[in-house]
Image (cartoon, rainbow, N blue to C red):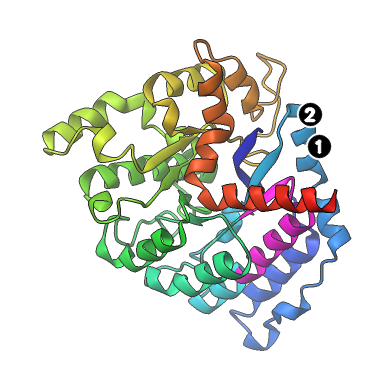
Amino acid sequence: MIIDIHGHYTTEPAALGLFRDKQLAALADPTRKPARSSLKISDDELVESVQPQLKKQRERGGDLTIFSPRASGMAHHIGSKEISAEWTAASNDLIYRICELLPENFAPVGQLPQFPGLSPAECIPELERLVNELGFVGVNLNPDPSGGHWAGEPITHRSWYPLYEKLCELEVPAMIHVSSSCNHNFHATGAHYINADTTAFMQLIQGDLFKDFPTLKFIIPHGGGAVPYHWGRYRGLAQEMKRPTLDQHLLKNVFFDTCVYHQPGIDLLARVIPVDNILFASEMLGAVKGIDPETGHHFDDTKRYIDGLQGLDDEQRYKIFEGNALRVYPRLARRLEALKAKKAVCA
């Protein structure tokens, strides 16, 4: 099975955007605040909206996408904590419905109702709803809810601990993923995302988070930002800080995806990062959707790059495409087993 662990709902029906516009307009005029019940999107509309993703799955040989709300759409820095909570719930509900309608193609990952200055502990009720009531297998965790100003505490700070305790209790990994940037110095996908990936990794080096949470699992997307390319720098910094070696300090808990959009980048990732820490992903219909004129193929057709890796045996390819995902996302493994059992009964 080919499991893509990083997909976002970037083809939402227009009704969701209109709901968001009304929600934000209510910041100036509270009487215009829309009720969540006013968001009317049929099952047929939802299925139709993800046909582009399904088409790419078939064409590129994929089987299942771990699916979450549009990353830039989370926009945790906009509005208020109440608006963030309502928008988060509405967005997550759509992901749930899509994954229920198309369970063989999608598995759900949710956003959290973060907001600048809000205690991470206040995200726990939505996390519990996602996992215990809706069967989500993971969440996206924004290390910078301020949208590019980095106004909060590092992800190793104890203010995050109640949320981490719940993640461990529920056996849910978190993908470290920022949202849109409100700082004009940082292009969202070209700078802000990559900066955040790199920043989060450095914060983890500086802290001792996994001594307190040995079962906590983080996925750093976009190939880890600048981390693999500067692996020697981070090894050296860890050494100067009297930290354990990176394999002991972080790599039992931190994983990297393959959202890297050229063959040399994937080659480097696989040379530097252990195979056990690499999970296949494409961020399909997300960051870079065009065709690479040097290859004639889409930049985000990342399976092609994994197929092109030299020196991988069958077991290593299995780990990247499937095995590591099932290990890092234990609830995904159970979800797929339940789906298999249900199909057997129906047959």
Q: What is the number of the mark on residue 59?
A: 2
On screen, 268 above or below 339? above
Residue 258: percent from left, percent from top? 53, 31
Badges 2 and 1: C-beta atoms under 8 Å apart? Answer: yes
Which residue is at 55% across, 23% downward?
317
Q: Is residue 283 left or right of residue 192?
A: right
Q: Secondary structure at mark 1?
A: helix
Asked whether 95 falls inside the magenta stretch, the response is yes
- Residue furthest top in the image: 310
Q: What is the number of the mark on residue 55?
A: 1
Residue 15: percent from left, percent from top? 79, 65
Asked whether 136 falls inside the magenta stretch, the response is no
On screen, 29 above or below 339? below
On screen, 245 above or below 184? above
**Residue 230 sits in quarter:** top left
Q: CA distance from mark 2 to mark 1?
A: 6 Å
Task: Inspect this view and state whether residue 260 appears.
Answer: no
**Residue 292 sits in quarter:** top right
Task: Inspect this view and state whether residue 137 appears.
Answer: yes
Highlighted magenta segment, given as a residue range: 89-108
